[in-house]
Amino acid sequence: MESLLNVVENTTGDCIKADDAEQHVIEEIRQMGNDALHCWGSTAEDREAKQLREQRPGLHGNGKKSCWHTTFGEIEVIEPLFRCPGQQIRPFRHSVGISARCCSLPLQRVMTDFGADHAFGKVPKKLQEHYGIEMPVSTIRTVTENHGQQMNSQRESSTLPVVTGCQQQIVEIDGCMLPIVTTRTDKGDKRKKKILHWKEARLALAHEEGNITPKFDATFGGSVDDAGHSLLNCAVTAGLGINTQIHGVGDGATWIADQMKKRFGSQASYLVDFYHVCEYLGGASKICAANDEKNWMDVQEKRLKNNEHSLVIHDLNPFLEGDEIGNSKAPVRSCHRYLT
């Protein structure tokens, strides 16, 4: 408290600016938190050791260091290691729920939060900047992946609820291929035995109409059915009910439309999003209206916005390439297939 009062009174003269004062307060609170946890640990150790000696007067032991990691830094406590025939007893560790060099739950939450958003190698710098602590990349990766595995094992596939639910939801799902590097397990230089392969990550979201906070879920490397389950989970979390109408948006992948129908049935409609259709139309415009691409695109975009896609398809038909032409050189056929 005295150090905080020194900041308040600016006794050292280095807290002229508000930012400097705030940084000093942060550093002092970190140190106070570390000191408080050390004192708490020592008090808890004395209490547990005293209780055990009263219960078993014949026990003897030497001091042993126990340490664990927290958001306030590493905490160390010297606890007695009691020995008896065929057994070692460490009452402090057992009573307070720690193990050797473990990470506290608040610290695990912080590391998992950073590790889920950034590359593991960048997390130590963020921990140092925001919490003033140092943690190895290997620990951050282990903690983050363990929590990810627990989340995946605890997730249950939802079913359509019997409640009324909200009136309207917007849902979307899409996937992209991500590069994955694995290392062969045989002996030798592992740097020369890395294998690159690809897995599809699928992200789903759902939100009630007018709500700007969507519910997210994702799958990585699973089947399209797994992705459909994740979309249903999002919708249920966002307030899906038996009277809820689902407006699905996505690209032209058939598996997305199939999952919309499979998960929501007659409650859902599916609309191919405007952006993806325009990408295909842009390629087709070079063939269908080589001398007036802009006006042709304007007409087709207005039709799409009015849900007159049949007229767009009608304008594509006269320019369809033959089957003998490869897909990469047949933009009109690609656009026609996308819309139909």
Image: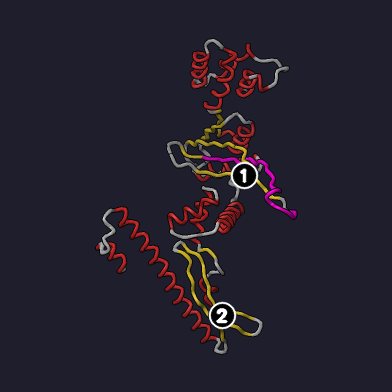
> Is the stretch drawn in magenta largely helix, strand or loop?
strand
Q: Label 2 belongs to which residue?
A: 81
How far separated are the C-alphas under marks 1 and 2? 46 Å
Q: Label 1 belongs to which residue?
A: 220
* Mark 2 Cα shell of 10 Å, populated few (<14), some (14-19), many (≥20): some
On the image, the x and y values in percent for residue 70 come to 48, 64
In this view, which residue lies farthest toward the bottom? 58
Left or right? Give the position of 79 relative to 324. Answer: left
> Quick check: 131 above or below 276?
below
* Mark 1 Cα shell of 10 Å, populated few (<14), some (14-19), many (≥20): some
Residue 200 part of the magenta segment: yes
Asked whether 172 or 49 is in front, the reply is 49
Left or right? Give the position of 10 relative to 122. Answer: left
The residue lying at 58 percent from left, 22 percent from top is: 280
Q: Which amino acid does the dot numbered 1 rest on?
A: Phe
Q: Quadrant of residue 83?
A: bottom right
Q: Quadrant of residue 253?
A: top right
Q: Is residue 267 visible?
A: yes
The residue lying at 37 percent from left, 61 percent from top is: 27
Bounds of the magenta segment: 186-205
